[in-house]
Amino acid sequence: MLTTAAPAVEILGAEKTYSSGTRALLPVNLAVHRGEVVTLLGPSGCGKSTLLNMIAGLLSPSAGEVRVWGNVRGTGAAPAASGVSFVFQEATLMPWARVAANVRLPLDLQGVAREEADARVSDALRLVGLEKFAQAYPRELSGGMQMRSSIARSLVTEPTLLLMDEPFGALDEITRNRLDDELLRLRRQRDLTVVFVTHSIHEAVYLSDRVVVMTARPGRVVDELAIAPSVPRDDAFRVSTEFATYAKRLQDALLAASTNADEALA
Amino acid sequence: MKRFLPPTIVAIVLLGLWQWWVTAFEIPVFLVPSPVRIAQTLVADWALLSGALMVTLKVTFLSLVCSVVLGVAVAFALVQSRWIETAFFPYAVLLQVTPIVAIAPLIIIWVQSPTLSLVICATIVAIFPIIANTTLGLRSVNPGLVSLFRMNGASRWQTLIRLRVPSALPYFFGGLRIASGLSLIGAVVAEFVAGTGGTGTGLAYQILQAGYQLNIPRMFAALALIAATGVLLFVLMGWLSHRALGGWHESARATDSAF
């Protein structure tokens, strides 16, 4: 069960090599503490999604170990039942089911009683501001609203750890910024620990307590940057010098990493 | 209404031209009967033709039902493992590419009941699109949703019923539309083959008989009934698919002008 002393996520030398010999991810050591928002930032092919999928239990590491709340991944209950939720790159809703039914799906699969499930679905929809759209079909919603439904679905199981794989990548910038704000609000309200994958430097700076910089060929962790927790996350922050300084440092780290990789190849 | 008006206008114009051409050039009725003459024959021979129509309809519907039941069952079996699909799918293709006229005589000899033999032939013709489309549909599942189901500890059964089956429905209905037309074609073709053996009294048999007797208006009347049945089946399947997928799938929405 939930061991409060243990970090939310502990990655101990976990790596991924496919049977074809492709090294998707070199050994990673990383701890995510309770209540933290940690972003995995890097270009495509840097193994950030691979790492997230290993935390989710959807992929198993070829060597090393991944622990969530102190429990080794791949043993025990289904990930979602142990307080882990996943938000995918796209909304990934069932087109044939109404929003409410989509959000209720994890509870249905886990066998939660109908009445309790319905109450929790209403709560989750209210949390993301979609209570009026419970009876709509996904295709009737905008991209941002579909993503909100997807977030509501991930929150309905009352997770302690939220894993997000470039969830807002397909949205326009205005919608994305708004959803970033909503995510930070939800994180406070629900005392969530979040591991967030993105390739946007700005999103990483805005959301994170800590940014883990990764690079490709082969995928690995190259740097880490803490964002001062005292900074208020608001529109002023987005245009501040502080923000630009963080962004610059991340950009430099990414650039340095990719230059080194190219040199290594040459 | 907008959907029915243009084809109706086309039909009226074509039939009018046909009527005018036959009358103006005094085409003999044993070559090309006029639409009015065909309509008269349809009424005059209704007792005979309606009986034949019922036989053809019965074979068509039975074979469509068999295709759906067997086709869906085969599709479910095929998606159980890649090995099963690789091993058995070529035989489904074999069924598809063998001309029914070539196997029909054998089936008619082997199977005592005339109706059953016709149903078997028509099923062989109609089953392939159901198998192929349903298999494709059961496999065309959003990988993200599969992960979501896995993360929530869904059983194989839950994944099948709540995810694979609904994902497959649009594909299945696409197959059903094609199969409905094929089951009618299969029923008619099989009856042509069987008819020479003296069994069956469906529409195809009426066409053969009328041909021997040079009763061309009756041939056309029977032909008109087959065509009408085909169109009706197509419309019916379209309606069914619209009812089943209404609201959520693109194909069901295609006729809504708003989108």
Image: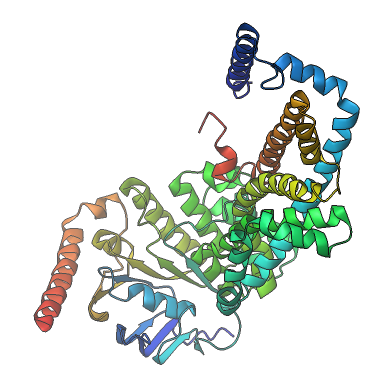
Question: Count the marks: how many?
Answer: 0
Residue at the limit of the structure toward the top, as seen here: B24
Q: Is residue A80 visible?
A: no
- Between A5 and B193, the one lying in front of the other is B193
Locate residue B80, reporting x and y percent: 63, 74
What colouring style does the render use? Answer: rainbow
Viewer-proximal residue among B231 and A171: B231
Left or right of residue A224, residue A86 in this image: right
Horizontal side of residue B106 vs A2, given as left or right? right
On the image, which quarter does residue B129 sit in?
bottom right
Picture quadrant of residue A42: bottom left
A48 with respect to A97 (left or right)? left
> Between residues A40 and B232, which one lies in front from this camera angle?
B232
Compared with A173, A43 (above or below) is below
Residue at point 53% right, 61% down?
B140
Q: Is residue B88 visible?
A: yes
x%, y% of residue B98?
62, 61
Q: Quadrant of the N terminus of chain B?
A: top right
**Residue shown at the point (59%, 57%) measured from the top left:** B133
Q: Position of residue A169 (x, y in %)?
A: 35, 57
The residue under the point 84% across, 56% down is B116
**Which residue is rendered at x = 66% and y = 74% of the image?**
B156
Residue B171 in the image: state x and y as whole percent. Answer: 59, 53
Question: In this view of the protein, which residue sits in the foreground, B155 or B173?
Answer: B173
- Looking at the image, the residue that sits furthest to the right is B47
